[in-house]
Image (cartoon, coloured by chain):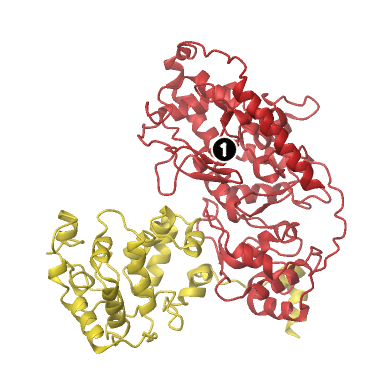
């Protein structure tokens, strides 16, 4: 019997009975992967836990820091990241950033064609009459994000996108200044949030899910946001 | 009957407090220009400042006097108490919003007597009940360090306490009951190491502030370090005796030192507020100080054997066993012995068996990482189950764990899980 052999051969009975724990980052970060998935694929069923796979590492590490500093408020995440060091957060961020997980569609509420059209407009062209830049102008043509620190939007659920835009308006999510998304979120009407979340949540997954490389010609953050928080894009 | 007595006590205290407000005793005048008593040159001594930095870390001053994401020691964290919230002030040397105009004598009065610079009584959420034991020399070093920090201009909010606690003079009655000023007096019958440990635990480390039961008025029980529920935070800080019946029964020097230095030991891991304490404070202690603390805790008296609790809470043991096998056994082992240095044992674990069940309930709900320390820079973690398990399932698996192997703690109710599910994190 293998068990008896191990018992006899092991240095102590306790050592023989102990589970074998792999020394891997995956094993170490069970607190993360139980909700976000082993490969950071998110929770397509509920839409509450966002996809992390393939997002820029600097963005992910920055957001973990924001949960520590109180800029992002969500009690389970605040508790989970509370004891981590910057170095460990960077390692965890690099792990999820390097993952290639398939996209899974999330449920999207049925909205009218007009709402979808408005969502498409905001995502692709923005609304200059209200000073709203398009999503693609910052998050990349494929909406898979831009290095080093702009996250992808492709693959995020309707529920998650609408909740995040809402949280910028209620100050439960913020970024260090300049907080570009706070500006955008406060220019959207409630109906715009539904529209943009529905359009993003129903997009087919991109074939290349990596963040686009940084464009050396462009600033990391858009000029309209950096130069003048109130100005038109 | 008991409630009636507490009510009477509150009325008496309020009357006493009102008497103090309307018939104040003459205040001891503050010495003029006290800064001359300790020379500026003394306060600039690099060796003194370095010692003060170490002592401020042991005292974990930054934990309260820093707000989330804020500059260390610049204050702003709001401390929740059952009587209202008290923001911790800025203790950088900014002249207008910090301690810039304070002399060492002012600082000594605050730390040792619990009095502010203008003679006002300080709220005991600032743990002067413990800090009064800190020696004059150590206080001077801490003050020198704080005065060496870059000044940060950041005004502190006013406390928002309910009446009658909002009246500072009502503290006079509280202090008469619960506060006895006095520097730690070494016990000549004990070794220097034991005395050092006792000084750190009872004084600067202010362990009693969590690890001792508080009564309805927030006063500490005279039975020190016998464990207690931390008000508002809803964690249970366990008994710290390493002798039979104590919360640390069976813990050797190595176990105590490991936990305080790395956040993890063969007997258990630090989590909740203790994880903060390890990361910010105890991991920075010298080995000599850690050994001293272990020596002292191992000398605390044995505790009376817990009376077998008559529990009226029943739970489905078979269902608990199934939940344990599915969710817990991979890491903590079917035998509840964990994996040394990685996953803590649950069999005999003081936080599993503490009287309230809060720690086990909240750990199952929240999961989380052991603290990152120099000795454990990439800790393993536990998944949170708040999203996966309902109140009844959490209560069942926690009850199962509390009554398996050698554990004999009372079962917990689903309604308790429901309560602690909603305790704020900070």
Q: Nearer the viewer, residue B102 or B148?
A: B102
Indicate left or right for B82 with B70 as reference: right
Q: Label 1 is found on which chain of the structure?
A: B
Q: Residues within 10 Å of mark 1 (few under 14, many from 20)?
A: many
Residue B321 position in % (x across, y down) = 73, 78
Label 1 secondary element: helix
User: What hue represents chain A?
Assistant: yellow
Q: Nearer the viewer, residue A150 or B195?
A: A150
Q: Which chain is depicted red?
A: B
Q: Position of residue B253 (x, y in %)?
A: 71, 46
Q: Could you say which quadrant of the image residue B120 lies in?
A: top right
Is residue B242 visible in the rendered image? The answer is no
Q: Is residue A114 above or below residue A83?
A: below
Residue B219 visible in this rendered orientation of the protein:
yes
Residue at image point 57% right, 48% down: B278
User: What residue is drawn where x is 36% and y is 58%?
Assistant: A171
The residue carrying mark 1 is B58
Q: Position of residue A60 (x, y in %)?
A: 36, 65
Left/right of residue B6 with respect to residue A196 in the rendered view: right
**What residue sits 34% from the left and 88% below the top?**
A110
Q: Quadrant of residue A3?
A: bottom right
Q: Is residue B389 left or right of residue A55?
A: right
In the image, taking residue A222 as reference, residue A200 lies left or right, namely right
Q: Is residue A230 above or below residue A147?
A: above
Q: How many marks?
A: 1
């Amino acid at each position: 019997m293998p068990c008896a052999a191990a018992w006899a051969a092991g240095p102590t009975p306790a050592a023989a009975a102990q589970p074998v724990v792999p020394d891997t980052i995956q094993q170490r970060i069970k607190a993360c992967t139980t909700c976000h998935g082993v490969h950071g694929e998110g929770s397509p069923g509920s839409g509450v836990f966002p996809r992390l796979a393939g997002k820029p590492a600097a963005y992910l590490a920055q957001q973990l820091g924001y949960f520590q500093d109180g800029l992002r408020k969500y009690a389970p995440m605040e508790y989970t990241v509370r004891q981590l060091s910057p170095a460990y957060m960077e390692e965890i961020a690099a792990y999820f950033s390097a993952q290639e997980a398939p996209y899974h569609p999330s449920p999207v509420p049925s909205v009218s064609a007009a709402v979808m059209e408005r969502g498409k407009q905001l995502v692709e062209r923005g609304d200059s009459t209200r000073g709203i830049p398009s999503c693609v102008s910052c998050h990349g043509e494929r909406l898979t994000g831009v290095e080093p620190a702009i996250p992808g939007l492709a693959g995020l659920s309707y529920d998650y996108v609408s909740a995040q835009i809402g949280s910028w308006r209620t100050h439960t999510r913020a970024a260090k200044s300049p907080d570009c998304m706070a500006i955008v979120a406060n220019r959207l009407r409630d109906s715009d949030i539904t529209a943009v979340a529905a359009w993003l949540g129903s997009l087919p997954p991109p074939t290349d899910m990596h963040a686009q490389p940084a464009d050396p010609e462009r600033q990391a953050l858009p000029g309209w946001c950096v130069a003048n928080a109130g100005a038109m894009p | 009957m008991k409630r009636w007595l507490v009510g009477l006590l509150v009325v008496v205290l309020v009357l006493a407090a009102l008497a103090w407000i309307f018939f104040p005793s003459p205040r001891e005048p503050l010495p003029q220009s006290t800064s001359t008593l300790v020379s500026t040159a003394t306060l600039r001594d690099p060796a003194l400042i370095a010692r003060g930095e170490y002592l401020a870390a042991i005292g974990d001053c930054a934990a309260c006097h820093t707000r989330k994401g804020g500059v260390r020691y610049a204050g702003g964290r709001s401390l929740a108490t059952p009587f209202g919230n008290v923001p911790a002030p800025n203790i950088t040397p900014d002249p207008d919003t910090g301690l810039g105009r304070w002399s060492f004598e002012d600082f000594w009065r605050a730390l040792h007597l619990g009095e502010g610079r203008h003679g006002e009584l300080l709220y005991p959420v600032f743990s002067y009940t413990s800090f009064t034991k800190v020696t004059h020399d150590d206080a001077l070093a801490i003050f020198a360090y704080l005065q060496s920090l870059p000044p940060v201009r950041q005004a502190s909010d006013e406390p928002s306490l309910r009446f009658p606690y909002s009246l500072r003079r009502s503290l006079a009655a509280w202090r008469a009951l619960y506060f006895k000023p006095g520097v730690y007096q070494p016990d000549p019958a004990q070794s220097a190491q034991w005395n050092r440990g006792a000084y750190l635990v009872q004084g600067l480390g202010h362990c009693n502030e969590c690890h001792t039961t508080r009564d309805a008025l927030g006063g500490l029980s005279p039975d020190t370090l016998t464990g207690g529920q931390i008000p508002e935070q809803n964690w249970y800080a366990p008994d710290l005796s390493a002798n039979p019946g104590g919360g640390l029964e069976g813990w050797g020097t190595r176990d105590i030192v490991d936990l305080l230095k790395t956040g993890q030991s063969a007997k258990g891991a630090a989590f909740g507020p203790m994880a903060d304490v390890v990361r910010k404070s105890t991991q920075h202690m010298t080995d000599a100080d850690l050994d001293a603390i272990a020596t002292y805790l191992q000398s605390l008296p044995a505790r009376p054997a817990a009376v077998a609790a008559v529990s009226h809470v029943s739970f489905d043991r078979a269902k608990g066993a199934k939940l344990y096998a599915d969710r817990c056994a991979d890491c903590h082992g079917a035998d509840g012995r964990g994996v040394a240095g990685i996953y803590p044992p649950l069999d005999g674990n003081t936080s599993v068996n503490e009287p309230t069940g809060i720690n086990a309930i909240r750990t199952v709900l929240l999961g989380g990482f052991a603290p990152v320390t120099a000795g454990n820079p990439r800790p393993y973690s536990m998944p949170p189950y708040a999203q996966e398990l309902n109140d009844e399932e959490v209560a069942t698996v926690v009850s199962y764990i509390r009554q398996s192997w050698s554990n004999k703690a009372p079962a917990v109710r689903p309604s308790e899980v429901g309560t602690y599910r909603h305790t704020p994190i900070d």
